[in-house]
Image (tube, rainbow, N blue to C red):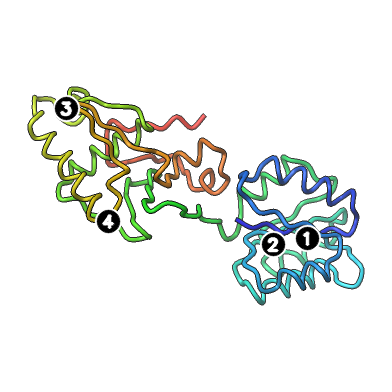
Amino acid sequence: MRVLLVDDEELGLIRLKNAAEKVLPKETEILSYTNPVKALEENADKSIDIAFLDIEMPVLNGITLAKKLKTANPKINIIFVTAYHEYALDAYKMHASGYVTKPVNEEKVKEELDGLRYPVEIAATKKLQVKCFGNFDVFVSGKPLKFKYAKSKELFAYLIDREGSSVNINELNAVLWEEDKKSYCRNLIADIKETLKSVNAEDVFIKRRNECYIDIDKIDCDAYEYKKNNSAAIRAYRGEYMVQYDWAFFESE
């Protein structure tokens, strides 16, 4: 995620940057400027997800800067920063994502990030993307991964829920069925291995003797990102977690 901060007052920019750094994911690229003209010149052709712009600036004010940035990137989230409430109408006329009044603090910035007009999606960095919020699904390069059996997918979901902890066959059998189906459980494990191998992601699933687990460092998962305070993941959570499975429960606090 790339975030642009522009305020011609250096102290105001420092306060804005400090507040943003506290609530944005650590991997966020933050670009800060006191010169709005330079900010436009160096970022007009870049993909900017969110821009915090002071409105009252010389030569190029925040409203004009926002219009120019939106020309290059129509879905940029513009959040205006100002000490003057009278600019609010102008800001909302151009469909800004939000409006922060000075002095800026962490709470104000977080409130605006939680209500973005164009939510920033979690950037995919691994081959396998796992979606736990809402219905459980697995994707490879944005395309759904299809397991041979629905129970294979549920077993994989349970391993995701366990966040890398080893799970033995007895536990899997108890969670997925009320009767003894250990032999069928082994068939499901074989299906998971074959399915992942077909997309060159077999190293995600580890099987040892009567235990298996997921290598969580090899997947992107919205639930895991939520627990890392990733703002995009936090916005994606709407109180629903793996809704198709009765055993699933997400500890959000």
Q: Amino acid at mark 2?
A: Ile
Q: Is residue 227 left or right of residue 163?
A: right
Residue drawn 9% across the image and 29% down it:
181
Question: How many numbered marks have been drawn onto this rendered protein structure?
Answer: 4
Q: Is residue 253 left or right of residue 195?
A: right
Residue identified by numbered label 2? 78
Q: Position of residue 68 (x, y in %)?
A: 73, 75
User: How far is disc 2 from disc 3 in space, using C-alphas?
Assistant: 50 Å
Labelled pair 2, 1 in contact (Cβ < 8 Å): yes
Q: Earlier in the sequence, mark 4 or mark 2?
A: 2
* Nearer mark to the viewer, of 2 and 3: 3
Q: Quadrant of residue 239?
A: top left
Along the line of sight, the residue nearer the viewer: 243 or 139 = 139
When the figure is inspected, residue 108 is found, relative to residue 127, above or below; the finding is: above
User: How far is disc 2 from disc 1 in space, using C-alphas?
Assistant: 7 Å
Residue drawn 84% across the image and 52% down it:
13
Q: Which mark is residue 199?
A: 4
Q: Callout 4: helix, strand or loop?
A: loop
Q: Quadrant of residue 182?
A: top left
Residue identified by numbered label 1? 53
Q: Amino acid at mark 1?
A: Leu
Q: Which mark is residue 173?
A: 3
